[in-house]
Image (spheres, rainbow, N blue to C red):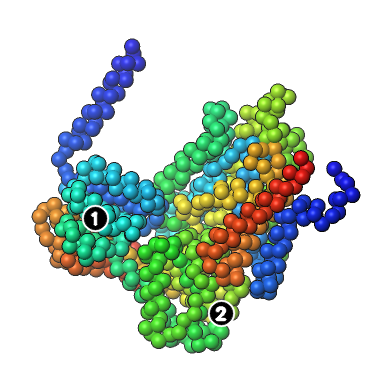
Amino acid sequence: MKTKNNFSLQYIFINYALYIIMALMILAIGMMSPKFFSLRVLRDILMQSSTRIIVAMGCMYILVSGSADLSGGRTVGLAAVIAGSLAQKSDYYIKFWPNLPEMPLIVPIFAAILIGLIIGLSNGFVTAKLKVPSFLATLSVMMVAYGANQLYCNKAPNNSQPLGGFLKTFSELGTGSFLNIPYIVYIAIFVCIFQFILLTKTCLGREIFACGSNQEAARVSGINVFKIQMVTFALAGACYGLAGCLEAARTGSATSNYGNGYEMDAIASCIVGGCSMTGGVGNVFGVFIGVLIFNIINYGLTFIGLSSYWQWVVKGLIIIVAVSLDMRKYNKEN
Amino acid sequence: MKKTVLFILAIVMMFATVGTVTAEDKPLAGVVWYNFADTFIQNARQSLLNVAKADGTIEVTDADSNNDVATQTNNINNMFAQGVQYFVLNNLNTAAISDIVNQAKAEGVTTIFANTDSPSDEDFANYDDLYLVTSRATESGTIMGEAVAKYWEEHPEADRNQNGKLDYIMLYGFTWHYDTQVRAEYSIQALEDAGITTNRIGGEIIAEYNRGKAQEMVAALLANYSDDIDAIFSANDDMALGAIEALKAGGFFKDEKTFIPVCGVDATAVGVDALKDGTLLVTSLNNPVKLGKAIYKTMWLLENDQEVTTETLGLDGVEVEGHRIWISYTAITKDNVDDASYDINDAAF
């Protein structure tokens, strides 16, 4: 593929469109308000991105394996509520489980990941075993998860109140930092590294890509497609569960409406980051940048005081520009 | 053969159940709520169901519009098709009030608009069996404005950039939402009535009543306007608490000097907790139990051919003006947190 032209401006522009757009955005916002170039802003954006990065990573497993997943957002919400209900101080006056003693930090985290896993495995089962198209399978599982969440939240004595009164250790997980970098940023980066290794350095990773590229070919060449689908949905579910737990810790509360719409943000970030809707293509770093771009838009436009209405318009336009430029990369190669 | 028998049996059983439901001669009230996921609505709904169950005069069935006008329209038609005697609408579609009133009139169903903006005088003149049960939404704004005005007068250092203006952030739920509009408008009105000049920072910050969103947006504004922000107004407690989280992360609420007045509405449990912590300045309670009870009591009075007046309703803080039934907001601060508690299982009316 490498020719003399590789170093031409056009080549650079097409191949690095995403990064150029991100740099231009940062530059434009910074020119309007120089305070944007500060460590605090960087820290804020990384912190706000971290739970979404984890959700997007989960979503990436699914997209790469050639399926779609709409259950992400509501799984985050259910996991947030379950983690929150297990992380309350014993003297909080509407404690979700009044007789439950204060739990060590690992319990809510573990419970959130577990519920994510269960939902993920249900998605996998409905898709791989019952042969329901993944779009519909995950849509249905999403509805069940949301309904279950509302039922759970409505349990007396909570009666659909937002959950609060979290233990210090739990809140610290979402708001504390080490070397001035929030814990949740470390966790998000750890998830990315894990995923990078899994997808690129292991046999399983190659099988996931193979399934996404061409499921029939993968099946014929001896890959257990059922297993791959179950594994990818389970991994995705675990990511959503973890993100939900962190979302509760970060905001200091949880309601049944948490995570609403996160699945669309995650899918959009994945696509902006170079994943293909038809499977088999995607890289962890691209998705990471995709999430960052969205959060820089969200953060930066509020930062300069642009009205929320305009933010939607600008956001939509940036996605169109970013993806259409990025697509030219593939057109060129073909 | 076995299957056919089972099928017929199932059909017979279904009809039998329907039969027993219709056999009871209780009047049926159909209630359409804008969104079950809204804490306040959920509590009002539970309260209404509990009161109805305990009393037993009127049976209540309800539906969720999922915050969507089209779903609400379907729900309305569904209720009329069910032949309800009373129709209660927690209306989303504020542009279509008159149309809905006309539809109810054509169906001849006694209609109560609940916790929403009022039908016009013409609508009331047009249809005799039309009622409104709602809180005085403007009060929730006024309570925030007055609390901040008081704080501003008592604390000269509250003008952090000393520009002589109260620089504030306004957190909106949804701009088209009636409560959001009046809360924003009347809080600032109260400040201006107190002779305070104001300046809004960051325009209309639409955080969709969502704690996480508000937290992120306020964090972004803080990074730019950290030295300017004097106060934060929020259309609900969740967004106010998100703002407080962002302020804490930005170095505020460490001591008295780093206090910033933040106001919310709803007096949720987590909101009251923040009042006790000394972070939230004020919130106000629109008591969902009172809403549930006022709706039921209105229907109960009508069912028993009694007039609906302040006296016959007999609920504290509820006033009747013609066919409009108003419920007052209660200001809740650190000093009266106990007033914020209510019991949705309390079925006395």
Q: Which residue is mark 2?
A: B228
Tell me the chain of label 1: B
- At label 1, counting other C-alpha atoms closer than 10 Å, the crowd grade (few under 14, some 14-19, many 20 or more) is many
Residue in view at x 70 percent, y 47 percent:
A327
Residue A174 visible in the snapshot? no
Identify the residue at the far right of this view. A4
Residue in view at x 35 percent, y 16 percent:
B3
Between A250 and A3, the one nearer to me in the picture: A3
Dot 2: what SS?
loop
Q: Residue flagged by tag 2: what amino acid is it?
A: Asp
Mark 1 against mark 2, which lies toward the viewer? 1
Residue in view at x 28 percent, y 24 percent:
B11
Taking the image as shown, residue B316 lies to the left or right of residue B153, namely: left
Q: Quadrant of residue B179?
A: bottom left
> Residue A120: where, in percent of width, then height?
57, 39
Between A235 and B104, the one nearer to me in the picture: B104
Taking the image as shown, residue B331 lies to the left or right of residue B26, namely: right
Q: Which residue is mark 1?
A: B101
Q: Residue flagged by tag 1: what amino acid is it?
A: Val
Q: Are marks 1 and 2 on the same chain?
A: yes
